[in-house]
Structures are given as structure tokens and as C-alpha cells.
Image: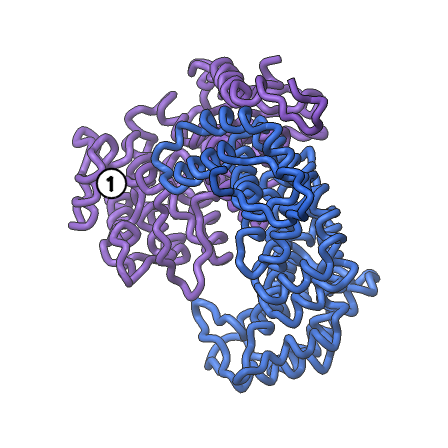
Chain colours: A purple, B blue
Amino acid sequence: MLIEDAGIPPGTFGNIRFLDSGFKGSRVYSAIDGGRVVAVKIIDLDSSVDELAEAEREVLILSSLRHAHVTRLMRSFVNGHFLLIVQNLYSSLSLYRLLEGGFPDGLPELAVAFVIGDCLIGLTYLHKCGLVHRALSAAHLLCDDKGRISITGMRHSIAIAQGLSHDFPSQHALHNLPWLAPEILAQDLRGYGRPSDIYSLGILALELANGKAPFAGLEAEKVLLYKLRDIVPSLNASKCFREPFTDFTDRCLQYEPENRPTCIDLARHVYLKQVKKYSSLWRFIHPPKDIKSIQEAKQSPMKHTAEGDRATLRDGNSLSNDIHWSWEDSDKS
Amino acid sequence: MPLFGKSQKNPAELVKALRDSVQALEAGDRKAEKAQEDVSKNLNQMKTMLYGSPEQEPQTDMVISQLAQELYNSNLLLSLIESLQKIDFEGKKDVALIFNNILRRQIGQRFPTVEYILVKPQILFILIGGYEKQDIALNCGGMLRECARHESLAKVILYSEDFYKFFSYIESSSFDIASDAFSTFKELLTRHKVLSAEFLETSYEQVFSHYQALLNSDNYVTKRQSLKLLGELLLDRHNFNIMTKYISSADNLKLMMMMLRDRSRNIQFEAFHVFKVFVANPNKPRPILDILLRNRDKLVDFLTRFHTDRADDEQFNDEKAYLIRQIRELKPITDSPQSTPQHSANPPPQ
């Protein structure tokens, strides 16, 4: 069975449908679990030495959070060497896929304001819980069928004591480079804290408005150099942004962390005030006719993932199958 | 005190208010909703007193020491933990934050909260029991680990019957609870080297008969984590006597040889790190030597092909080469009339 191969125990969920593939080969499905529509993320714990510890971090952080704009853990369990993380999202679509599927040149300015507004509410909660997210990006925002936004990607986050951290996210730095604040990349004694997420929020706003993150496609060394020199490339010259938007992003992208506003300050920014009374992204853009169609347009990786699994199993077995240890003298062959 | 805003309760008032609201919550009558609100509010204030907030510095040492004293006198820590399930989601987190902060409090060499808990050890056992309740398991786990950092508290847990409950919590079907329980279990067995070596030695049979079940678990994570911890325990020099005992059992060797050929590469790899201790032992007991000799060619062949893609891991390759050499050179014990209890792995060529 294809589905069984992919790590889903048969008979546990109803209506399983592939949604997306995530970081390091994880896969996300939508499914029915005990009558509720959920998102099931499947992680292969045997894929690398560190994956188990990473997944533990993610699950433990997730289970300490409960907020309307942060993905919520329903349950997590192990099946063979796969971990299944069941989350409360339904028909979820990452903003990255939304851009890719329907808005290659970016969302309208007010739609961006709506997404950033929702994201900011979730981020305020994370900051209150003593976490720095460290990886805000369109790929880590999910939108449900009602047009509400939640933050995901909690495995990247870190708990900060005394408001500062010196931990360098070496596992993810390259992957998240465009969004990372200069002070995280500087890796110096000053460390970094909540303001680093505000920088990422600024990049995220540009990403949503342009369809692509600034720095995307540049070599890592160049991005590093630009960031440490306080250069943010302006992009998409054909697009003209209004002043509230540029003021908002300028404030977020201040080089010195202490010059950036806090979540609470930003929530009062005039750019976000324009959309305060709306509660759905679909007030600003048409929902993809069928969220499904975008996903099905992408080639489903289910099939070759399953084949990949079989291949790894074969490799593991090739070592072991032909050997039988001898415990007793009579076993000698 | 701030000029504007709500007036601040002093520690005695705050402890009393919180105690009263927790009691009202316990009573569970029609005022429960109001009680829940009061509990959250008071917990939040107490947290701010200890940790401060963006608008407010933490309170002075004097205020905090007053707060701690009030907490001991009123037994509020105990009743908060007893009522934990009834407190709302964020309130549960605040209880853990308050508990952990008060526990870390130090006066010179003394930890007054540790002394308090030693007099009220039921706090520890209620926290351990918390692993059985999904909605408070991780809050209790966090507090327990903070306790386990103190040797005297770790000792109470290790030498109690309740310690053995961890063996079932670790196999919990919920991944988050199992992971959290395992990290507490690991903390208890590795943080205080002398204490845990003493404990493992005196309780060897009981601990390792339970540990066997973890190693044989159907749960991939249980199996892998317990195998890895076993390797760490055996290779810690404080645990020399425990290692000697462990590697003289033929059953233990058989288990490791089975795990060497587990389907999972990570389990194979962890098993290697335990298996190597059996081979490197210069004084192999007869049953161990017999098994290794009986499988000598197969082992050499197997190890030669074992994880050959780890070319960059110098230490692993050195160890592997050493094991292969050792196994190749194994000599059977000759049944001479003299007693030959000591056997060298490298007998001089005859």
C-alpha cells in the first residue's frame, strides 16, 4: 500500500489527501481524525541522526502553545520510524504556495496588510511566551479555508532567557538566510532577541508584496555581506508601493535591533489599521477557486516518496538479511 | 511602586488571594468561572513579581524572599500542583514558571525551596503522577526536571518506588509525553554521576530488568533513545562497575548483536557503541567469548561492511577497525587443568 509505505498507519485517518512537502522531506496531509479535519505532518525520524531531537523540540514547543494564530498540536505519535504530528489546520495552504500558485508578482498591498496583521497577533503571543520564532517567512504562514492566517515552523524557534540568545541556528541558517536578521548572522557577543523577528516580518512583508523574498536567488556570501552592511535590495521597480507600506517595512528593517518597533508598537501602525475590521484574507483576494487545484497542479511527491522509503529499507536490510547469528553450538552451519 | 496603573498587592496579600481563588476553584461551585479568572490574574501577578515584564522590573530580593516565605508557610506550591488540572492553559504554564523560579532561589549555599520540598516530598510524587494526565504532563515534567537538578531531590525520586513508573511513561503512545518523560529519566540518571552510579549499582537487577523492556520496545523512539542512553551510561567512567556487570551477560550481548542488524540505521549505529564495549573487554567471561568465537567470521564480514558510508567519521572507523582486529584474533580458552579465570583478549602467540 502506498499510504502505509508513507508512514500512515492504515485505518487511523479518513480522507487522506497530500497537501505539501516541507523542510527536509517531511510531508503534510489533510485528513479526518476523530471527526475533525486536521493536518498530519509526517517526519522520518530515521532520515538523519539529528532529526529525532529536532522533532522533539518542535513537538514540545508546539504543545506549550495555544493561540488562534499559531498552529495547534492535537496529538503526536510514532508509527515505525515515522513521527505523525496532528495539527488543527484544515485545508491549509502555505502563503508560499499561494504566491507561487496565483500571485507570482505578489499580493495586493491590503492583502499583505491583512496577512501581516494576523501574523503579528500570533507573533505577539510567541514573544509573550518567551520565544523567538527565527524563521518567519511565507512558507511558515498557513492560510485556512476561512482566510485566517496561522504561524507554523515552530521547530526553528528558540526560548530566550533574559531577552537574548547567542544560539546560532546553524541547521537552518542557509535555508532561512533571506529572512534572518543581521544580528543573528553576526554571531557576536550582543546576541539577538525579539527584534530579530521584527526584521524577518519586514522581509516577509516584502516577500508577500513582491512574490519573492528580497535576496532570493543571490549567493549566500553576497546575502551575508549585504545584510551586515545594512543593504536591502529594492525590488520589483514596476510595482509602486504606498507610503504606509514602505514606512512599515522601513521600521521593521532598521539595522540596529533597538531601533525596531515591538509587536505592540507595530500593531498600532497606520498600515495595519486599514484592514483592522476585516477577518478574512478572502476579502482582499479571491480564494484559489479550489485550494485543491493548486496543490494538485503540483506533482504529488507521494509516489516517489514511497519508493524512496522502500529503497532505504532495502539498503538497511541488505546489510542484515543475509546474516544470522549463532547462539548455540548446534547453530553452527 | 508605579505611579499609575493597578495598585500592587504585597507578597502576603498576593499569596492569600491566590490561595483563596485556588480553593474556590477546587470547590467547583457556580463561582468557578470567576475563580478561574482570579487564579489566572494572581498567577500572572506573581510571575511578574519574579520575572518582571516589559514594563516592569522584577521585584527586589527582599520582596521575593517574602514571597517565598509566604509560599512555604501557606503550602501554596503544593495546592497549586494538586489543583493544576483545574487551572487554565496559560495558568498552568505560569505555575511551572513560578515553581521553577522559586526552586532556583539560593541563599549562600542553601536552597530554601529544596529544603521545603524535602519536608513535603509528596510534591515530587504528585509531579511524577502528572505524566499520567495528558493536559498537565509537560508542565509537571518541566517542574520535575528542575527538581532533578538538585541532588537531594533526585535521590528521593531515584530511591522511591515511583521511579519505576518512568519505564511505562517513556513508552507512552503520545510522543510528546514519552519524549518529556525520557528527558526527565535521563536527567535523573546522568546529572549527578556519583549518586546515579551508586543507585544503579544497588538497584542493578531491578533497573536493568525494566530497562530490558525499553530496549525491546516496539516503539522506535523508545528503543533508539534507551539504547543511546545505555551506551552513554556504560561508557561513563563513574559507572565502571555497572558496565562490568552489564557486559558479562551473554543475553545482553545477544541483544546488541540483534540490534546491530536492526532495520533502522540509527539503531544499528547506537548498538555498535554498546557492542564495542563487549569486544574491548580484556576479561571476557566464557559465555561472551563463546558467542564471539562462534560468530567470528560472520562478525568480521559484517563489521567490514557495516556503515561504510561514514567515511568522514574518523573515530567510528578507528573503533570499527579495532573491533575487527580484536575479533579476528580471538582465541578460544583452552580447557587446561589449571584454572584460567582471567583471559586476555590478546594472548601471546603460541
Horizontal and vertical percent position of residue B250: 68, 39
Residue at position x 58%, y 48% in the image: B283
Residue at position x 65%, y 46% in the image: B248
Considering depth in this image, is B62 or B210 the residue closer to the camera? B210
Q: Which residue is mark 1?
A: A242
Q: Quadrant of residue B255?
A: top right
Specify the quadrant that holds the N terminus of chain A. Answer: top right
Q: Is residue B293 left or right of residue B18?
A: left
At mark 1, the secondary structure is loop
Considering depth in this image, is A5 or B281 the residue closer to the camera? B281
Q: Is residue B311 left or right of residue A158?
A: left
Give the class, few, some or many, for how many residues have Cα within 10 Å of label 1's Cα (few <14, many ≥20).
few
The type of residue carrying mark 1 is Arg
Q: Is residue A323 left or right of residue A286?
A: right
Residue at position x 62%, y 39% in the image: B333
Q: Is residue B24 above or below residue A14?
A: below
Q: Is residue B197 above or below residue B175?
A: below
Horizontal and vertical percent position of residue B45: 58, 71
User: Pointer 1 indicates a residue of which chain?
Assistant: A
Considering depth in this image, is A198 or B287 the residue closer to the camera? B287
Residue at position x 47%, y 33% in the image: B324
Horizontal and vertical percent position of residue B318: 39, 39
Q: Is residue A40 visible?
A: no
Q: Is residue B116 left or right of residue A162?
A: right
Specify the quadrant that holds the C terminus of chain A. Answer: top right
The single residue placed furthest to the front in the displayed view is B337
Horizontal and vertical percent position of residue A322: 57, 17
Q: Quadrant of residue B173?
A: top right
The single residue placed furthest to the bottom in the displayed view is B62
